[in-house]
Amino acid sequence: MQEFDWQPTADIGTLRKRARLLARVRAFFADRGVLEVETPVLGHGGSTDVHLASLSCQVITSAGRERLWLQTSPEAHMKRLLAAGSGPIFQLARSFRDGEVGRRHNLEFTMLEWYRPGMALDALIEETTDLVAAVLERNLGPARRLRYRALFRDLLAIDPFTVELSELRRLAGEWGNLDASALSRDACLDLLMGLVIEPQLGREGIEVVVDYPASHAALARRHRDPEDGEWVASRFELYLEGLELANGYDELTDAEEQAARLTADNAARRHAGLPEVDVDHRLLAALAHGLPESSGVALGIDRLIQLALGKSSVAEVMAFATTRC
Amino acid sequence: MANYSTNEFKGGLKVMLDGDPCAIVDNELVKPGKGQAFSRVKLRNLMTGRVWERTFKSGDSLEAADVMDLEMEYLYNDGDMWYFMKTDGSFEQYAVEKKALGDTEKWLKEQVPYTVTLWNDNAISVSAPNFIELEVVETDPGLKGDTAQGGSKPAALSSGAVVKVPLFIEEGEVLKVDTRSGEYVSRA
């Protein structure tokens, strides 16, 4: 414990600016008729995503003692609102991801998440770009779209869909200076994306990566690429100044497919020796009832504020980062 | 020894890598989009001083290195080994090889406390205090009346270091020197 540990990680002037930027976010959505909602951070189901570590806690409710999960994003509750007929909604939601600590990460952080029933993914990419420009008060121009496959071809001279696993491991090992001989195909691609490609993205305005491999779909739909016939995920990620800011989906509405993916996630968790996470049955029931065709996006608002204020870490724009909580 | 997993990596942690003790300088989480997490780690090899950059899969671990920094006074050398003594009252002595001394050799002065880094109870490096007072053993004669103007000349110090000093400094004077930059600070 150090003498100055009680002090905030953001100075008070920064917190004032943060509040103004959040007001811009709310004004942006008010102008567009998107309803602000608040949903619980706790849920009976958690995120089964193999790459997210969920926190849980024991609580006492009218049902007795039970385990509830802290959300990794407000997705499940917001989709249940969509299924209940909410129309377009947004939320600034506290989200929790165990182990994620660093310059660009904090264990708990604020996710700006919004859903647009009836809006195509392309239109949502435009809206996300507009939101970023509105918060930064910068004219960023239209976002440049980059296809996942083309990025790997241009920057690493490989086709991520067809390259031999041995070659992929050799490249990952070389760039990461690690023994990659046991890494999976996806892990190699993630490493190369994180170490080589991401830092180069968004250096001259907003860049949006589209057409991820189908294995990276999570809660997004998949579609066949009209050009080359490969299955790709209907999602995008938005980058500015080397920072990944947002992650958008053409939302999967098929309850059975969703249930199968969640079950597969837990099987992958068992296989990897990770704890299983309770499946969100109420989300599945909502999908079975019927989720309107929607696109949705999650944006790390702390990172956007970090960029807006020219800070070098998210901790500097949070009142108290986890190291000081 | 214990093992540390990537999420315990933080600046200053001492770990073993490729058979050498290392200190972690920096650990940055790399997590592209929805993908797998990696740790991008900078480590300083405590044997060579070189900084390595390595990537680890989240959850990988490294063995802890039995490394300690202890305060010890410099005693003497026999041309082969340099001898230091713990300042904790135990009078315990350690022999240090020239290789482990590195650049610190030119800042050695008897009875001054140094930080000696031990790995498995062997001295692997020695660092000098940030400031040290040393006598000038050789320099060109001082220029009288030139106490304020710029200009400098080399001066050899009793420890063997040569530093740039103002023109008015004379042989036999004791100077305060910054060992990190090798610069003259003031007359002691």
Image (spheres, grey):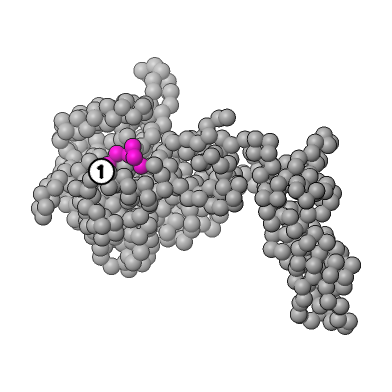
Q: Is residue A35 above or below residue B145?
A: above
Place of residue A69 in the rendered image (x, y in percent of width and height, measured from the top left): 37, 29
Relative to A141, residue A157 above or below: above
* Magenta residue span: A180-185
Query: Could you say where residue A275 lies in the image, as x and y percent from the top left?
Result: 37, 26
Q: Which residue is mark 1?
A: A165
Residue B122 belongs to magenta span? no
Q: Which residue shows up at 79% across the image and 45% down it?
A: B83
**Spot occupied by residue B92 in the image (x, y as percentages of width and height):** 80, 36
Q: Tag 1: residue type?
A: Leu
**Helix, strand or loop under label 1:** helix
Decide which of B32, A249 is in the foreground and name it: B32
Query: Which quadrant does the C terminus of chain B fall into?
Result: bottom right
Q: Is residue B71 left or right of residue A210?
A: right
Q: Is residue A74 left or right of residue A325?
A: left
Q: For this view, does B172 lie left or right of residue B33? A: right
- Considering depth in this image, is A118 or B40 the residue closer to the camera? B40
Please count the marks in the image: 1
